[in-house]
Amino acid sequence: MNLLCDLSFDALGELLRGYSQPSFRTKQIFSHIAAGRELGAMTGVPKDLVKRLEDDGWRALGLTVEKSFTSALDGTVKYLYALGDGNIVEGVLMKYKYGNTLCVSTQVGCAMGCAFCASTLGGLVRDLTAGEILSQVLVVNALNAEKDRRGVTNVVLMGSGEPLDNYDNVTAFLDLLADERGINVSRRNVSLSTCGLCDRIRKLADDGYAPVLTISLHTPFDELRKKIMPIANKYSVAEVVGAAKYYFEKTGRRVIFEYSMIEGENDTRECALALAGLLKGFPSHVNLIRLNYVKERGLKGSCDTAIDKFSKILDNNGVSNTVRRSMGSDIEGACGQLRRKYINNKN
Ligand code: SAH
């Protein structure tokens, strides 16, 4: 199966020239795709062209919404998407006063093996293509933009998968997302979260991409980090912070460190002081969030008192930080709870 949503505007134009189409057709079909329409629903596009494209194995979008669950707590919606090959990926739409943020997946499963995360339980199944990542935004935007409701205004690459382990597709996705002739989500409103692939962080900046970079640090100590994040065997905490500084210097964008608080592991005074020492003088920000429960894992989230104490120590040492509340935890839509498939509705 070939996906039209994988194609840049120019590549779509070239394809359509091969079908002897006038040049306005490119703009027309590109904007239909941006509106989340499948080939059959593209008004104004000749039926015989639709048929020829379909016969040649083309589809407009990379997935369909299989199911959705809405949180009774905060209105967060979890989406289960069915990919063309039957794989399932998940995404989460969070509604804030300033807009709607969609958390997108970049891989089916994940190879990184973090000890607290459900997305990596079955390992990496495959990378998503640029169009499959984009399709998540397009279909959710279309669903939410109906009836004058607001569509997707912000996109975070924080669903299942490690975005920088799927570098080419993810950067192609960033290009598609920012194309003014398409869905045109402002580059300022896109965040990319990584467990800290240092070489790729530097490459991203060198290649001229500048999403808000969020690095899942979770501890200032190498030994503990190795215990909970296998990637720490490859890159030390000092190297991760070095790559963050490089990114900041190149892009001018303040880096955010994600810190999921695990009871009795990374929530101690010692950890807070070491983290403050590590980030001293570096214009960055720390997001503290309680570890969410993942039933296959034995780790527990820290209590409110421990989180508040930790935050105060950072405050007192001049480290900008926010305690983030978890959204969608009743629908298993919170950080670390996204899975690659749902089996017999057990999840
Ligand atoms: N691979 C990327 C993006 C996906 S995970 C990354 O590692 O950043 C998005 C965020 O959720 C990361 O900060 C990750 O460490 C965090 N996370 C994973 N499992 C979690 C859990 N059970 N509770 C809280 N945060 C979790």
Image (cartoon, grey):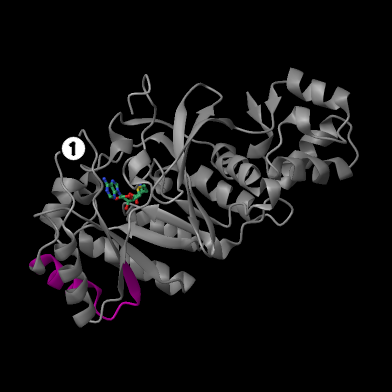
The residue under the point 73% across, 46% down is 9
Residue 334 screen position, x and y as percent = 35, 46
What residue would you read off at disc 1?
297
Residue 218 screen position, x and y as percent = 23, 57
- From this view, report whether residue 254 is shown above or below residue 206: below
- In this rendering, position of residue 196 left or right of residue 116: right
Query: Is residue 3 covered in magenta?
Result: no
Judging from the image, what secondary structure is the residue with disc 1 in? loop
Please count the marks in the image: 1
Query: Is residue 274 covered in magenta?
Result: yes
Q: Is residue 40 visible?
A: yes
Residue 121 screen position, x and y as percent = 28, 32
Q: Is residue 208 visible?
A: no
Dot 1, crowdedness within 10 Å: few (<14), some or many (≥20)? few
* Label 1 CB sits under 8 Å from any ligand 1 atom: yes
The residue under the point 33% across, 54% down is 326
Q: In which quadrant is the N terminus drawn?
A: top right
Residue type for callout 1 = Arg
Which of 18 and 56 lies nearest the eye of the viewer?
56
- From this view, report whether residue 188 is shown above or below residue 147: below
Residue 75 screen position, x and y as percent = 46, 49
The residue under the point 38% across, 67% down is 255
| Residue 134 picture quarter | top right
Specify start and end residues of the magenta stretch as a single range. 270-286
Q: In which quadrant is the C terminus drawn?
A: top left
- In this rendering, position of residue 57 left or right of residue 167: right
